[in-house]
Amino acid sequence: MAISLYDVSVRSFLQTLGAVAHFLEKGRVHCEANGISLATLVETRVHEDMLPFRFQVVSVCHHTAGALAGVKAGEFHPPGAMEPLDYAGLQALVADAKAALEALTPDEVNAYEGKDVVFKLGERAMPFTAEGFLQSFSTPNLHFHASMTYAILRATGVPLGKRDYMGALRMKMA
């Protein structure tokens, strides 16, 4: 059986979004139990020259549901200006991205194969096919930003492990 565009995008994105939702919840519980400010956490950075936690979570959503919306439109842009979200708002954003992906059908996504997609950054335009964009641009970006979200939570003391990051595995059923 061939792997479809739906499998390598939507199914994989849902696995990572599910993991992010899980470790965001573990982070909320840990912070509330230990008197750690969620408002401060949302502004925490891995390094001073990196964007904060809230941007990392927004980017996770942008490179999943937003990436597929960009493929559908034929054009993808960096996330636009957003009102700063609090921790609960970030959790809701992840839930919304998950719901948007769950609403997509395999036939709809598989029909994007070979479609032209342009990533636009200011005056710069980078041409892709849908599968090239999703596999070589959005997927690595998704994992980078999910990793940064995880790293900030770990640095804050949230008890997370590799299994939390991996999410729900798609194991063979007997």
Image (cartoon, rainbow, N blue to C red):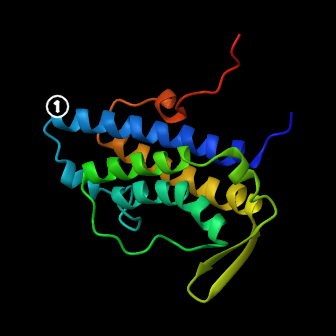
Query: 103 or 31, which is in the foreground?
Result: 103
**Considering only vertical position in the picture, is 27 above or below 125?**
above
Residue 143: % across, % down: 56, 49
Q: In the displayed orientation, state which residue is furthest to the bottom.
A: 123
Report the number of numbered marks: 1
Residue 43 versus residue 94 in the image, above or below: below
Q: Residue lying furthest left in this view? A: 35
Of residues 145 and 2, the one nearer the viewer is 2
Residue 99 location in percent, x, y? 47, 46
Q: At 30% from the left edge and 38% from the top edge, which residue is drawn? A: 27
The front one of 151 and 26 is: 26
Residue 113 figure quarter: bottom right
Q: Local crowd at mark 1 within 10 Å, few (<14), some, or many (≥20)? A: few
Q: Is residue 138 left or right of residue 30?
A: right
Rendered image quadrant of residue 45: bottom left
Which residue is under mark 1?
A: 33
Most foreground residue, 76 or 136: 76
Q: Residue furthest right?
A: 1
Q: Where in the figure is residue 108, as x and y percent of width and height?
A: 69, 53
Provide residue 61's location: percent of width, then percent of height. Answer: 47, 55
Element type at marker 1? Answer: helix
**What residue is shown at x 74% (from left), y 49% (from top)?**
5
In-image side of 41 versus 170 (left or right): left
The residue lying at 48 percent from left, 45 percent from top is 98
* The C terminus: image quadrant: top right
Amino acid, disc 1: Ala
Q: Which quadrant would the N terminus be assigned to in this image?
A: top right
Q: Is residue 129 above or below residue 46?
A: below
Q: For the point 41% across and 54% down, which residue is it?
A: 57
